[in-house]
Image (tube, grey):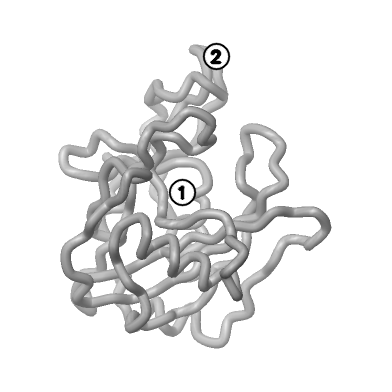
Amino acid sequence: MLEIDEVRRALRGREPARLAAGSLRRAAVAIVLGGGADSLELLLIERAKREGDPWSGQMAFPGGRLARGDATARAAAERETLEEVGLSLERAEFLGGLGELCGRLASPSDLAIAAFVFYEPAPGALAPNGEVSEAFWFPMRSLLDRERQVDFRVGTESGRLFPGVRVGEPAHQVVWGLTYRFLEALLSLLGQSFPARSGLPLHSRSDE
């Protein structure tokens, strides 16, 4: 379950879906898997808190908007990973693309974000830059632990609830929103899904 060969098979030859072009701005993230063949780990970052950043302080994958010098969205994901955590994906195994998702569900967005999956069994030490407050590896299997599943509240006491999963040790950080949706898509390709949540809300963001 959740072995690298399964991920290879699930993504091999897959044509990732794209959102309609139109006037959408585009960004890209790298879903980097590491560890042994049967003990996969997932690279996660906690974004630094910055005024004006809609994802300030959130758990995420390395990534960002396409820059003028990026030939492709995948190139942008690789560049951002090197800049944000000091990890070069030049020699990593490229497994495939997951497709594009709209940037935010809580409010309208004209940003389309593409996700690309890589495997780097020996990544070396991470070196987060000023945009990242923390970067760490998290066991893929632990994403499916029932006790880690939570409801994440956005806004006030009556704010909208989003599905989330606790990560890190201790499990005080929560993956939700766009990052959760990409993980949900990857797990679905692998024939897996997040377990039912406890229903207990976790109070957090109040700025949306």
Residue 78 picture location, percent across and down: 44, 69
Left or right: residue 145 compared with residue 7? left
Of the pair 96 and 83, the residue shown nearer to us: 83
Tag 1: amino acid: Tyr
Say which residue label 1 marks.
180
Mark seen at residue 19 = none
Residue at left offset 58%, top offset 62%: 114
Q: How many marks?
A: 2
Quarter-of-image position of residue 92: bottom left
Q: Residue furthest front?
A: 69
Q: Residue furthest right?
A: 22
Residue 43 picture location, percent across and down: 30, 59
Q: Tell me: residue 135, above or below residue 188.
A: above
Mark seen at residue 158 = 2
Quadrant location of the C terminus in the rendered image: top right
* Contact, mark 1 vs mark 2 (Cβ under 8 Å): no
Quarter-of-image position of residue 121: bottom left
Q: Tell me: residue 188, above or below residue 167.
A: below
Left or right: residue 41 compared with residue 204? left
Tag 2: amino acid: Ser
Of the pair 171 and 144, the residue shown nearer to us: 171
Separation of marks 1 and 2 at Cα, in angstroms: 22 Å
Considering the numbered disc 2 on the image, is that residue within a helix, a strand or a loop?
loop
